[in-house]
Amino acid sequence: KRVSSHYKDVNTQPVEYDTLEFVRALNPVLKLGDLFISANPHTSEVVNLPNVVYSSQKVDFKIIAKDSKGRNYSKGGGEVSIELKSCTGDHMTGVEVWDNKDGSYMASFVAEQVGEAKLSVSINGQPLKGSPYSIVVGRNYP
């Protein structure tokens, strides 16, 4: 409680992977630990996601994690979840996501059912702005 009452006097905006240190006049530095600021779902974004895909076609897209000021993260480690549902509400399989370790994540899916689908994307349990995304799945003609 004593430390938290002094924190209000700190004039700083911590950023990703900062370390907070408090110094008192007569005491050595007190290191409280590393501070991890999680990605902001309102500024993080999905890129290269098409609005129309074809059944049995593999679709790749990217998720870029950003902080609250819209700056790209430089490290990975966030928990990214992706869920693809058909227009009937059935979960589609074949959804994959992997961490590029640079603040971005690659993801892919194969839509199996023709019709409208919803793709939900979340980081650290929070849905990204605009999620779920609507995707039209057309018939895959050979």
Image (spheres, helix red, strand yellow):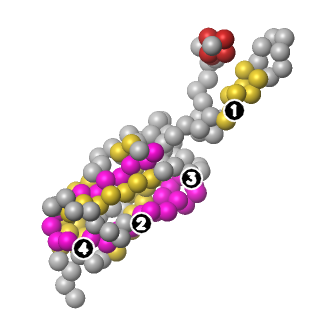
Q: In which quarter of the image is residue 13?
A: top right
Is 11 colored magenta in this rendering?
no
Tag on residue 96? 2
For the residue marked with disc 3, what is the amino acid?
A: Gly
SS for tag 3?
A: loop
Report whether 64 appears left or right of 111: right
Q: Answer whether residue 46 is visible to the viewer in this image.
A: no
For the residue marked with disc 2, what is the amino acid?
A: Glu
How many angstroms separate mark 3 from mark 2 (CA)? Answer: 16 Å
Which residue is the site of mark 3?
76
- Residue at position x 42%, y 66% from top? 96
Q: Which one is closest to the eye, mark 4 or mark 3? A: 4
For the residue marked with disc 1, what is the amino acid?
A: Gly
Which one is earlier in the sequence, the residue at label 2 or at label 4? 2
Residue extent of the magenta highlight: 96-124
Which one is earlier in the sequence, the residue at label 4 or at label 3? 3
SS for tag 4?
A: loop
Which residue is the site of mark 4?
112
Q: Answer whether residue 94 is visible to the viewer in this image.
A: yes
How many angstroms separate mark 4 from mark 3 (CA)? Answer: 30 Å
Q: In which quarter of the image is residue 52?
A: bottom left
